[in-house]
Amino acid sequence: MNEQPNVVTPEGPICDPTTLDDLLTGSRIIRDAFLKTTLRFAGRDTKLISSGVTDPSVILIRSGFAVRSCTMPNGRRAIFDLFIPGDLCGLFHLFTKYPMEEITAVNRVAYHSLDASAFRALFTQGKAGLSILAWMTDAHYRVERLTAAIGRLDAHGRVCVLLLDAYDRLRHRKLIHGNSFSLPLTQEEMADFLGMTLVHVNRTLRRLREEGLIVVERQFVIIQEPDRLRQLVSGLPCGMELPEPALPAEPRPGMISAQPRYEAALTNAD
Amino acid sequence: MNEQPNVVTPEGPICDPTTLDDLLTGSRIIRDAFLKTTLRFAGRDTKLISSGVTDPSVILIRSGFAVRSCTMPNGRRAIFDLFIPGDLCGLFHLFTKYPMEEITAVNRVAYHSLDASAFRALFTQGKAGLSILAWMTDAHYRVERLTAAIGRLDAHGRVCVLLLDAYDRLRHRKLIHGNSFSLPLTQEEMADFLGMTLVHVNRTLRRLREEGLIVVERQFVIIQEPDRLRQLVSGLPCGMELPEPALPAEPRPGMISAQPRYEAALTNAD
DNA sequence: CGGCGGATTGAAGGGAATCAATGCTTGTGG
DNA sequence: CCACAAGCATTGATTCCCTTCAATCCGCCG
């Protein structure tokens, strides 16, 4: 039943170099299309895409965080994905006239948006289609990873997955460099993400702090033992670390200093 | 916090008619490409796509069931998706050289397969690309629905989701017509799907039977109160009911009788 | 007939939810 | 500048759903 040993994937799942190159090209086309649109802003808890809206659009996040979620009749909420700066969201609304899910800013968010038909047009432009596919694949892996975590890990493990994943994604996108970062999620939001309750998230965070694994204080996270964490959550499906074209540093001038400070990059705080 | 009433989506999320038409055209191209390849067979517990394999391919299921899953170091398994006849699987392996996940037959499965590069070629052929996108979207909705169920529903609700979804998908594909069908999953597999234990799946099934909602006996399911069930699990993200071209009825001659029997269609049993 | 995989059921324990109260920040208005 | 309220974080006590462990049963196949 457990015959297969931990097949450690060598450097993670990644396709061949030529395809990687195509993906980068495609992503540039997409990025440029978004950058031509005006930059918009949304405050905390604003819906970037509402549930039930007729013609949803696709969004490129420039700064800030957002989540994809839905609320059930009993009032409980389930969060499926966390979007960080540079992410494309709403890809899965391309064919749905009335999405059940919504995308909400957890933060002050700066973004560009393209309506579904304009985005579908992109699809036939050179390598852009391939890139869209890759973005969707990436998003899909994140949900699968989450599903596995919620279904087969206890509270301790789930919180580790959430924090470690955020850490890794922010690092991969070069939005942070050290071992700490700001994560503007309330404990209730973490709970909705991980299929737990606010109270239990709190207790679990305390335990993690006592164990010296991770410190979370206010909305500031310090990853103390990345390697031990990574070991704890091994075996879950993992993403692809797609190549990504850099975004022009910051939407608003004056925010970019010589060495980018992550607080500025992430939360648009002073 | 719970201000939005149950926005019942009128007839489910579906895009505009012209796009629907394009999708159907695209799906036909894809279907034909698969049908040109030889038909293969796989027995129960055979891996259609193994984890860690270098160049995974895409598969069209002709008959039988399969699951997408991964096994964690502690020996526990998580199942992410259930594939039924007519499904495309392995779409999310297009860019991953070493997938962590595997696709396993839960049944005797007949299928066609195309390797990743051949499938990627399809991508640029007319509307096929759009169709692939739609297939991925559909699969994505299923996992999100599962995530919400595991995270925010109790055992009772989760089992309902699993059985009702299987029922709806089989019906949508016209593989069954009545209110009963054969579902070749063991209780352990259901447990891995729903983030529960085998024992508790069993108890929950008993409770459902006692309540007169669903009867599951051996691998045969009878949906007794579809409407009450649907109400129980409302609020979850729901799929799109894509238009699909019909597949030629049965891979092996002699299995198709005047009125198709679901046992034959689903399990290849005599 | 014996063995095996799957299903079923019981008893006991634990992890997480629930209920409830208190503290801490932050922002707002007097 | 302070008071107050609102939202979030923290902690305790209790309950219960689900897991774990274990035994038995059933149908099937060699």
Image (cartoon, coloured by chain):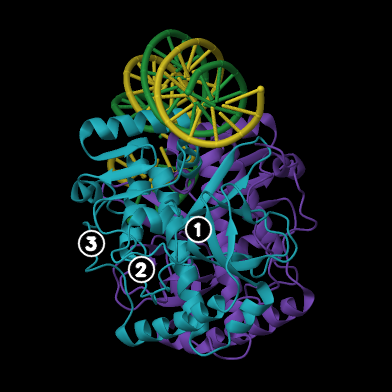
Chain colours: A cyan, B purple, C yellow, D green
How far, Cα to Cα, is label 2 from label 3? 16 Å
Residue B20: image quadrant is bottom right
Please, what is the three-letter code of the amino acid marked with disc 3? Answer: Val
Tell me the subunit letter for badge 3. A
- Left or right, B107 with reference to B233: left
- Left or right, B233 with reference to A164: right
Image quarter in which the C terminus of chain B is found: bottom right
Mark 2, residue position? A240
Mark 1, residue position? B81
Of badges 2 and 3, nearer the viewer stands 2
- Left or right, A81 with reference to B131: left
A267 in relation to D24, above or below: below
Residue A51 at what x, y percent from top left? 68, 54
Q: Residues within 10 Å of mark 3 (few under 14, many from 20)?
A: few
Establish whether labels 2 and 3 are both on one chain: yes
B81 in relation to A60, above or below: above
Establish whether labels 3 and 1 are both on one chain: no
Q: Nearer the viewer, residue A13 or C1?
A: A13
Of the numbered discs in the image, which one, if any, rests on residue A7? 3
How far, Cα to Cα, is label 2 from label 1? 20 Å
User: Mark 1: which secondary structure?
Assistant: strand
